[in-house]
Image (cartoon, helix red, strand yellow):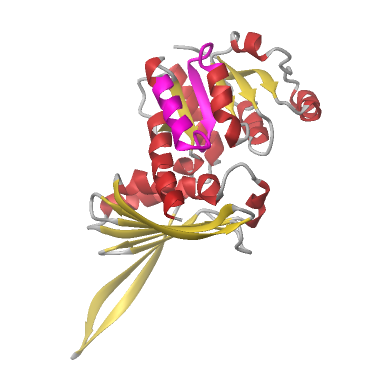
Amino acid sequence: MKDIVKVGLIGVGNMGKNHLRVLSILKNVHLEFIYDKDNDILDKFNKQYSVRKSKDLKEDLKTVDAVVISTPTSTHYEYFQLVYPYVKNIFIEKPISHDLKTSEKILNISRENNINLHVGFIERFNGTVISLKKLLKETEKVINVDFMRTNKVSSRITDVDVITDLMIHDIDLALLINGDVKDVFSYGTRENGMIAFACAVLTHKNGQFSKLTASRITEKRIRQINATCEDMFIDCCLLRKEVIVNRQTVDQSYRDVFLSSTQETIEVSNQEALLSEQVAFIESIISPEKENISAKAVDGVNAMKIANLIQENI
């Protein structure tokens, strides 16, 4: 068991700077170095967080217990190959890689070399999702779960399409909630040669359905999950961290029967999802025997398999 985990951070761009902020406040973490190809960004965060800039990445990898890879998706496989001979605890931002082939290579290498690899499916740690999962365990039967995720700003990402960028989160959640998939139907539209809007219906082996919508062209930011169950309808807003349960009970009034709906709001934890995710990653190093809800390499590949089917259909 380790008391302090030495961590290196590769990539301090849009998501990397958030990892930097979180890692810098964890008591059992010592941030050994940061690395990025943009030296101006390195200088900025070197001064802001007083963390050392890596000048020789291979040498610096020999000094750490864990590495967080938060670089553009198209470079994940390249950096994973560089890191794994030196470091056995790796956190890689979602998706695991830019395509299925390299994702499977990462999985195989991880298995062969006993790598503790976590994939950054942050929504697993969203308090709204955690509350939803508890409710779904209590319901008589889940029929369908709808996921909607839109973000116009996300068009800045040019190395992956909307499925690998946005929908991948909800593919992971659909697999987490409803299990393996036996059939995929999807449609979508392209913008500048890349899929910018996609809708997919997953038929799961347990007979339940997941409907996923992701868009880079919708003029509103949405993070929504709705679950239709036999005994309730669950309305979740991941942005507001709000879970509302709707039920209809049959009451009798004289000779007439009417439906009276009830609504309850479920309390949701406000802890930052990224903080919870990084705590789980560090705990997997300090106490590997503890139960952990993080996505592992196999989860990352399973999500990419479904993403690949959706892309092929479109």
Q: Which residues are magenta?
A: 83-110
Q: Where is residue 173 shown, x and y percent of the image? A: 41, 46
**Residue 147, can we see it?**
no
Q: In this orientation, which residue lies closer to the viewer: 279 or 118?
A: 118
For the point 44% across and 26% down, which residue is it?
A: 105
For the point 30% across and 72% down, which residue is it?
A: 248
Q: Residue furthest bottom?
A: 255
For the point 64% across and 45% down, which residue is it?
A: 157
In which quadrant of the rendered image does the N terminus lie?
top left
Q: Where is residue 128 shown, x and y percent of the image? A: 46, 50
**In the image, residue 46 lies in the stretch drawn in magenta:** no
For the point 79% across and 25% down, which residue is it?
A: 39
Relative horizontal placement of residue 99, taking residue 46 as reference (left or right): left
Q: In this orientation, which residue lies closer to the viewer: 312 or 197?
A: 312
Q: Where is residue 48 shown, x and y percent of the image? A: 78, 28
Q: Where is residue 255 shown, x and y percent of the image? A: 18, 91
**In the image, residue 96 lies in the stretch drawn in magenta:** yes
Q: In this orientation, which residue lies closer to the viewer: 212 or 32?
A: 212
Q: Is residue 101 above or below residue 268?
A: above
